[in-house]
Amino acid sequence: MLDNWQMTRRQLLQFGTTSIAAAGVASCRSLLPGSRNNTGESSDNSNRVILPSTCVPLEEGCPLKDHAASRGLIYGAAAKYPTLSSDSELANVLSRECALLVPENDFKWISLRPGLHQFDFTRSDWMADFADANNLLLRGHTLVWYKSLPRWFQKEVNVTNAEAVMLDHIRTVGNRYAGRMHSWDVVNEAIAPTPTIENPWRPSPWLDWVGEDYVAKAFHAAHEVDPDARLVYNENGLWWDAPEGEAKKLAVLRLLENLKTQGVPVHALGIQSHLRGHLMDQFQPEKMRQFLQNVADLEIEIIISELDVRDTDLPDDIGERDRLIASAYSEYLAVILEQPAVSTVVTWGLSDRDTWHNKAGRKNDARPLPFDRNLNRKPAWSAISNSFQNAPLHSP
Ligand code: XIL
């Protein structure tokens, strides 16, 4: 079965998870010959199929990626270059638990672009090579965003050159990693926190200087340079059902529908899912189910792209806090994983020793992720693995 080299990479990846899920068990990884690496040479590990690794049969102690793969799903985590390159313990746990890596900051403009005419791929290349070396799929985050722009941006970019600058960035970066990417977040957070029918857009230099079709233009450019990558529209604030959450869901659906109608190559929606532990009463399963179905009806795949549980307003007691965080994961994933269009779940970090929440709220005491600071599995880990085990079998 694995010698049909003519299949597209997307088919191969889907084949990898679903065929193994159907078989129930596997004890190996498979690598398929791939296309270019960043030097343009042939690479042996780009078009790889990630198979469940060591667990036969699936047991409690198996890594999250195996629990996910047994249901036809991909599990991955975000990590940043400064941590991954210096913390070998975390790197080992990540490569054991995950089938996919998202560089948390290293593919953002602020990392890649020291100047208008300069690119610095030091960190992004290191992350891509780490992914290759550890048989991890790679998700690029993010080509076009209103945030994380370098200082020089406001001075050097304007209405006259913005479109050329955006397209040059997408072509240069997309081309460098073409053939190696599982997916690209092409555009991040284009919809306003409280969108209206008249103006759904989030303020952004791209909107101001390129116009509303900056989104469509970005997707076309990404598709031209990396036709095999899943192209993702990534958005925040979609998980809860405050009135603004409803308006946001509608605006995102309208945007996706418009893009599809225009023939724009948008393949997946990334639902960030930065849950807040104390606001889980604002998560309404029925509304989320309906939203996911509406996305699926557009023939758009769904990636849970930045899952974590903020614990700032949860009780201080660690046992109680961990229980509530775990229950937020369970409650959310039970609903999400019912939807067959969901293919991938990514947590925004793996261990509490390195989470963006350590910079806010609870400072260095945040516990939003599946592993604690000592890299021990937490109740959140069990909640996620149980959610995978209880999920229906997913197929492409
Ligand atoms: C965050 C990173 O986690 C931080 O390390 C960084 O300082 C700021 O950005 N939504 C996104 C991500 O799409 O890029 C953000 O990541 C978190 C919110």
Image (tube, helix red, strand yellow):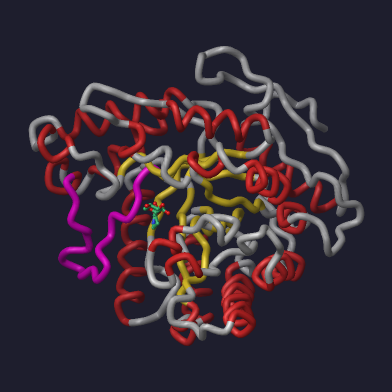
The vertical placement of 327 against 369, above or below, is below
Q: Quadrant of the N terminus?
A: top right
Q: Is residue 18 magenta?
A: no
Residue 104 x %, y % = 46, 47
Q: Can residue 218 be seen here?
A: yes
* Number of on-image labels: 0
Residue at 48 percent of width and 41 percent of height: 82
x%, y% of residue 115? 23, 27
Q: Residue at x 74, y 61 (%)?
A: 393
- Does the rendering let one see residue 302? no
Horizontally, residue 179 falls left or right of residue 124, namely right
Q: Main secondary structure of the magenta part?
A: loop
Q: Find residue 84 and report its image quarter.
A: top right
Q: Which quadrant of the structure image shows residue 100?
A: top right
309 on left or right of 74: left
Answer above or below: position of 106 versus 381. above
Image position, residue 242 (x, y; %):
35, 82
Residue at the spot x=61%, y=70% of the render? 333
The location of residue 173, given as percent across then percent down, is 39, 28
Ligand 1 position by quadrant:
bottom left
Q: Residue furthest right?
A: 57
Magenta-highlighted residues? 186-205
Q: Residue at x 70, y 22 (%)?
A: 33
Q: Nearer the viewer, residue 89 or 257?
A: 89
Task: Decide whether residue 204 is among the magenta residues.
Answer: yes
Q: Nearer the viewer, residue 148 or 215?
A: 148
